[in-house]
Image: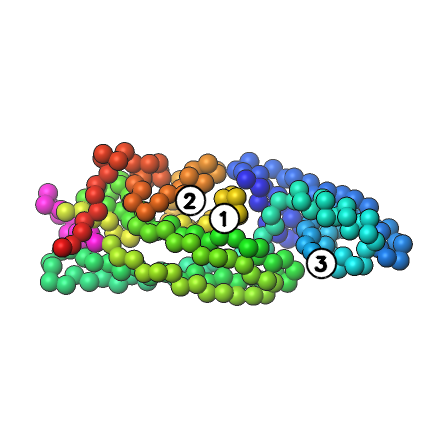
Amino acid sequence: MKLALRVGFGVLTICGSLGYVVANPEMRVVDTQGRTIEIELISADEKTVTFRRKGNAREFTLTLDQLDAESRTRIAEEAKALPTVLPRIEPVVVIGKRRDKGSSYYMVKQTVSCTVKLRNPDTILPLPKLNGRVIFYGQNQKMPDAFRVLSVQDFPVQLQPGESASTELKDFITIYDSDNKGEGNIGGYQYAGYLLVFLAEEGEVLFDQTTDAKTRQALAGRPDLLRAFSNYSVGSGFDAKLAPFAPNLLPPPYTQH
């Protein structure tokens, strides 16, 4: 996995969990007035090119029609090999939880809602067309080391510089035993957390976020596990380290009749 993030004035390219820097291509381009510029290419689209000048940490953006035809062709070729560049975004995930015991003393029907708020604070870089995905999971109330995916929801992501968006996902319901005392505990899965990921078209994970400290710790330095967990489906079981739970040992969900 290659992910480029804007850091300070530059672009740091991170490959997998190794964290080493990959140099951006350097080239000589010529503008329409015949002036030559030594640049380090950062990003390019159909209309613009963003670069640093040699020996200067500042970023510049020009429209491609300011460069000669040969320079535009070279930039287009080099841009194909560049990693995906994302602006520094900080999604806000708002979780709502509504409890309803009905006539039961201990069984709880929990309705979970979610809104994902996004803003692109960058004035140059767009957030490209990606697939957003939220994996919601619950913890078994009889066997705390057993977790189950409760809902997986996808939504489109694409923001121009300075643009904001808010996506309201579909509510889902889980049922669990709220009385953890005694051997008669029925179990069920109480909502425990989420993982938000942004995926490229080929399925590469370009961004991930969770507020669950244990999940964040389990995923640290494990891009393989992140890819696998991002593809867990509804009903998938896993342990506290996010490893698949043996199907024959996974407690079933509780359903009311």
Other-residue count near label 2 (Cα within 10 Å), few / some / many at <14 / 14–19 / ≥20: many
Residue 250 shown in magenta: no
Other-residue count near label 1 (Cα within 10 Å), few / some / many at <14 / 14–19 / ≥20: many
Residue wearing tag 1: 199
Extreme residue toward the right, this view: 34
The percent coordinates of residue 81 (x first, y second) are 66, 42
At x 21% / y 47%, what residue is drawn?
Answer: 253
Quadrant position of the C terminus in the picture:
bottom left
95 to the left or right of 84: left
175 to the left or right of 25: left
Instruction: Say which element carries label 2.
Output: helix
Tell me where residue 248 sits by quadrant.
Answer: top left
The percent coordinates of residue 62 (x first, y second) are 75, 58
113 to the left or right of 251: right
- Is residue 117 shown above or below 174? below
The percent coordinates of residue 202 (x first, y second) are 52, 44
How far apart marks 1 and 2 lie (CA) works out to 9 Å
At x 45% / y 57%, what residue is drawn?
Answer: 155
125 to the left or right of 73: left
Specify the amino acid type for callout 2.
Answer: Ser
Is residue 232 among the parts visible in the rendering?
Answer: yes
Residue wearing tag 2: 230
* Viewer-proximal residue among 1 and 156: 156
Specify the amino acid type for callout 3.
Answer: Lys
Is residue 29 among the parts visible in the rendering?
Answer: no
Q: Given contact means CB atoms under 8 Å apart, are the residues at marks 1 and 2 in contact?
A: yes
- Mark 3 or 2, which is nearer the eye? 3
Quadrant position of the N terminus in the picture:
top right
Which circle marks residue 137 in the picture? Answer: none
Residue wearing tag 3: 47
